[in-house]
Every structure is written in C-alpha cells, then in structure tokens.
Image (spheres, helix red, strand yellow):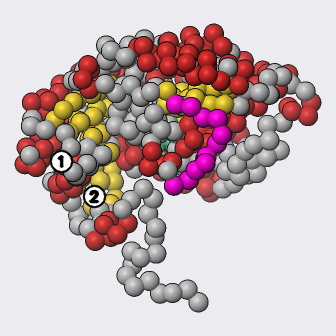
Amino acid sequence: MANTPQNTMDAYWMPFTANRQFKKTPRIMKAAKGMYYTSDDDRQILDGTAGLWCCNAGHSRSEITQAVSHQIEQLDYAPSFQMSHPLPFELANRLVALAPEGINKVFYTNSGSESVDTALKIAVAYHRIRGEASRTRFVGREKGYHGVGFGGISVGGLVNNRKMFGPLLPGADHLPHTLNIDLNAFSRGLPEHGVELAQALESIVGLHDASTIAAVIVEPLQGSAGVILPAKGYLQALRDICDKYGILLIFDEVITGFGRIGNCFAAEEFGVTPDIITTAKGLTNGAVPMGAVFVSDKIHDTFMAGPEEMIEFFHGYTYSGHPVACAAALASLDIYKKDNLFEKAHSLGQYFEDGAHRLAELEHVQDVRNYGLVAAIDLKSRDGAPGARAFEVFTECYKRGVLIRVTGDIIALSPPLIIEHSHIDELFGTLAEVIQATA
Ligand code: PMP
C-alpha cells in the first residue's frame, strides 16, 4: 500500500523547481483569462511571461476550449502509425503556408524536447541516406537551451542541465555564446558587435573535418539563457559556413515560433532560412502539449528518394498529430490570424522596448536587451549570492501581482501578444518599483 503523503504537496516532484523551498512558499494559479492569472488566494496576476513563453494569444481562449471539447467528443484518438485522421493533414498544410520558402513538410511531436531530438535524428539519417554516414557530429552553442532529452542537453550549453547526466551524446561541440555586455550593453534590437563569433564554426570544422558534422543547431534568439541576441549578420554567417561545408542548419524556434518577435518565425524576421525548424509552445497556445518539426523539401525529398529499406523514418510518437492537439493548434492559428497577432511584435515593439529601457537608469541594472515582445533586464549579482537579487525581484513582483521569469540574475519578459499599452505600463511600472525597493 502506498504511503499516505503527510501534506497534500508532498507527492508531486516538480520540474526545474527548488522543491523544498517552493513547498514552503508555494505559488499556485487556479485560473487564467486573457492577460491575467488568478492565484489561489484570489489575486489577479499580470502574465509577463505568456506562461512559459507559450500562451501567445493569452489565456483560456474560448475558441480553443470549444475546438478541443468538440474534438474529444468526435474522435479522441486515432493511431498515428500506418493510420491517421484528417486533422494533421489539414494542420500541416496550414503550417507550411506560414513557413519560409522551401520548407514544406511537418513532423509532429509532443514537446520542444521531442522536436529537438527528432530534428537531430533527421539530420543524421539524411546524411546517411545520401551516403555520408560519417556525418554524426553536432554543433550547438554555449548557453543554448534545446530541451531535456539526451540529444537536447548534449547540444545545449547550460551547464546545470548537463553536469549530472554525462557522458551525453558523443560528438557535440559548442560555438561561443553571443552575449557581450561590455560592447553591446543596452542595445535595442540586434546588437552591432559579435558577427565574428560565427567564425568559430570554421575552427570546429577545421578540427573535426566537415565530413563528420551533421548539423548546427541554434536558437535564433536564445530565450531560456536570458534573452541573448545574435549580432547583426551572425545568423547569415552561420548559414554561409554551413552551406560551404554541406552542414545542415537547424533553428530551434520553440520560443521564437508563432509570432514572439514579429513574423511567424524568427527565420523570416531575420531573413535567414535554416534547413529544419523545431517548434512547440505557441503552436497550440500552450493549451495542449504539441510540437512540430518543419523540414525543407531538400531533406524530405532525400528521404523519399532513398533506398527502399530506408524510406521509412523509424521514428514517431503514439501522440504524433494527436486529434485534440491538432484541434487546439488549428484554433490557435485561427486566432493568430483573426487578431493579427504576428504583427503585434512589430506594432507594439517600440512601446515595449521604450518601457524596458526606462529601467536602464535603475541601480544594479547592467543591461537591457530586447527584440519584438521579448526583453531581458540583466541585474548585477550580489557579491557571493548569484541569482539572489533577481529571485527577490521575482517573488516581490509576484506579491504585487506581476509574473516575471528569472534565470540567474536576468529577468526575462515575454508577455502574451495580446498585451496592450496599459499592461506594458503595469509590467514595467511594477518592475521599476520592485527593482528600486530591492536595491
Ligand atoms: N527548445 C527551446 C529553444 C526551448 O526554449 C524549450 C523550452 N523552453 C525547449 C526546446 C524544450 O521544450 P519542452 O519544454 O516543451 O520540451
């Protein structure tokens, strides 16, 4: 017989959370609508983070609720291998219409982590089908976050996520990260300095030889590490080096996909087309778990033209293209279009940017970075207590009714795209007061 938990919070082992600390002072949401959560003590909490970068159209949209409940009644599940149902086909057509030119195929997953592992496997198999089985290495980037699968943490560059789980995938190298506060502090949009960092890829190719490298994977804009932007020209430089050596380029757009920085994808916004794009989060507005990997015609055609025994991609999930997730995604795409939300990062970006940069004057703020509806307020760490200052700001903001996200001493903001001027004022107004109070 199972043990009886001593209190009602004991049994749940929470992800990426200091469990002992959290359970002493829990933060529990019991409802959400539009831009606000309702906490369990009945306070309205402004959502400055779109959940975890995912509720792009705001919370509890009735269009999604209706689509999901109708779908569960109509068809709750159909096998995803050797069978299907109409919705994943309809959704794929809708999705590729939003993707950059030449990217016209979609493979479904259930999360960002699964999208990343799927993309890495597609890259290796692609080369193998073409007769280049030696291309098995990957290149990621320092501070990169690509989910928590073994593939994702191997190409990822956040040390805490890696250090307990070695030896990881053999053959993963890392480009230097692109954060340079000395040269780029308080940049607005893409920073001026750092395009030369892409040249590190030439060194990695020189070290291992191009014939061993399958793919480079980067977030076009690093989110989880604290909103780290690429310098102007940097992503194009990576694209050029990949092309020179026949290496695939994967953009992990789990955060930037579906309108976060203007345009549906960062690839479009930055004018650089990768070979594969990984997504999740905003695909269903965070309402139902789902991910999607967008693949170029070149890669897909290679699979289809490969030897008979390789035509099948021996990969997939029980819930790939799940009917309920597809219904949520289709309803989300309808909302994004109807409310013109992929435009919001452009139309509101300047106001959001000005709000963020007003915090630059405050004590202990060492950098403010932003693009579209994403911003970071980078605080100087307290001596001997890294992360303590930002965590204090986080808990105090929560008390005052504003949800932000912190990574180390960096505050990351990524509100739902339905945000309005008054919410932007509330977000940065509260943050200013709290940063001042904690100075
Ligand atoms: N890639 C990126 C760029 C992400 O930001 C995340 C999640 N924050 C993931 C992958 C992993 O997604 P999930 O948590 O859905 O597995």
Q: Is residue 427 shown in magenta?
A: no
Magenta highlight: main SS: loop
**Nearest to the observer: residue 63 or residue 133:** 133
- The image shows residue 419 at horizontal and vertical percentages of 28, 36
**Considering depth in this image, is 211 or 100 the residue closer to the camera?**
211
List the single residue furthest toward the right: 308
Mark 2 vs mark 1: give the one in front. Answer: 1
Few, some or many C-alpha atoms within 10 Å of disc 1 (few <14, some 14-19, many ≥20)? few
User: Alpha carbon of mark 2 to alpha carbon of mark 1: how far?
Assistant: 35 Å
Q: Which residue is mark 1?
A: 383
Tell whether 127 sits left or right of 65: right
For the point 46% across and 75% down, which residue is it? Answer: 11
- Secondary structure of residue under mark 1: loop
Q: Amino acid at mark 1?
A: Asp
Answer left or right for 355 relative to 168: left
The vertical placement of 170 against 296, above or below, is below
* Residue drawn at the location 21% of the way across and 56% of the way down: 395
Which stretch is magenta? 164-174
Q: Nearer the viewer, residue 224 or 366?
A: 366
Q: Quadrant of the N terminus?
A: bottom right
Q: Which mark is drawn over residue 38?
A: 2
Amino acid type, callout 2: Thr
| Badge 2 or badge 1: first in the primary sequence | 2
